[in-house]
Amino acid sequence: MLGAAVATAMAANGGENVFKTNYTSSGIGGLLSSVLVPPLGRFGQFCIVILALSIIANNCPNIYSVSLSLQVLSSATARVPRFVWTFVGTLVYCGIAIPGYESFESVLENFMLLIAYWLAIYEGIALSEHVFFKKGFEGYRPENYMDASRLPPGIAATVALLFGAMGAVLGMAQVWFTGPIGKLCGLEYGGDLGFELAFAFSAVSYCGLRWVEVKKFRR
């Protein structure tokens, strides 16, 4: 309700008010400042600082999980300490965040859209493996986790990833690009079918390629 009240206040008086002005000039931080600082004074400024620091605190588990994800890629990355990967990840997101400050919302939106396409590809591959080849949770062998000779070679997954990316490109309808299939789904701006096509392309290609992979490598 508080969020709805703040957002509604931006439209008051035809949008010509301090809420709208501060939001236009400084984004969400400016909007929160116009709500907290006038009635609370210096304590409101203190609250703004705490809110800014809370963003960093909330991101700590996320960036720490990056180190865990990188360590499971291979035995080589597993030997690198987690704090090193965390530090590298922090440098990367700072390098992205600082240049993108002036257009934070558009940068975040574009990034999340790309993540959505990636999730579709990942789900297409992972669900196909789980349902058709592992036949459920009973098909997993945790004891083979560190034995590369018993793990799938990954050729099918890599090629399916590329097919999924192709499906996303063909079906996407974004400000910066509209695929040929996406153009067919709307009169002016097209319709975004990137997620659905990415899932379909990756799942179908993985099923066929994985079948060949199992026949050849027996794993």
Image (tube, rainbow, N blue to C red):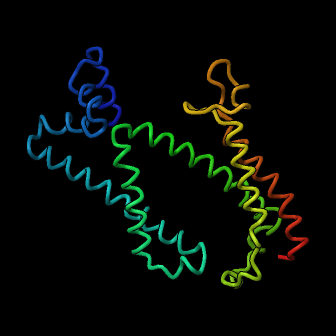
Compared to residue 134, the image places residue 36 above or below, namely: above
- Is residue 26 left or right of 89 when viewed as pictured? left
Give how far across and how far down residue 137 sits, in percent. 73, 71
124 shown above or below 171:
below
Residue 149 drawn at (x, y percent):
76, 83
Task: Indicate the quadrant where residue 73 lies.
Answer: bottom right
Left or right? Give the position of 189 relative to 78: right
Q: Relative to 219, is 111 above or below?
A: above
Question: Which residue is painted at 55% across and 42% down in the image?
Answer: 113
Picture layout, residue 145 above or below residue 61: below
Picture residue at 72% right of the left edge, 48% below the top: 199
Residue 144 x, y percent position in the rendering: 71, 83
Percent across and percent down for residue 136 are 77, 68
Instruction: Tell me the quarter of the image containing the C terminus.
Output: bottom right
Residue at the image point whose x is 66% and y is 83% from the top: 146
Which residue ends up furthest to the right in the rendered image?
215
Viewer-closest of 99 and 32: 99
Q: Quadrant of the N terminus?
A: top left
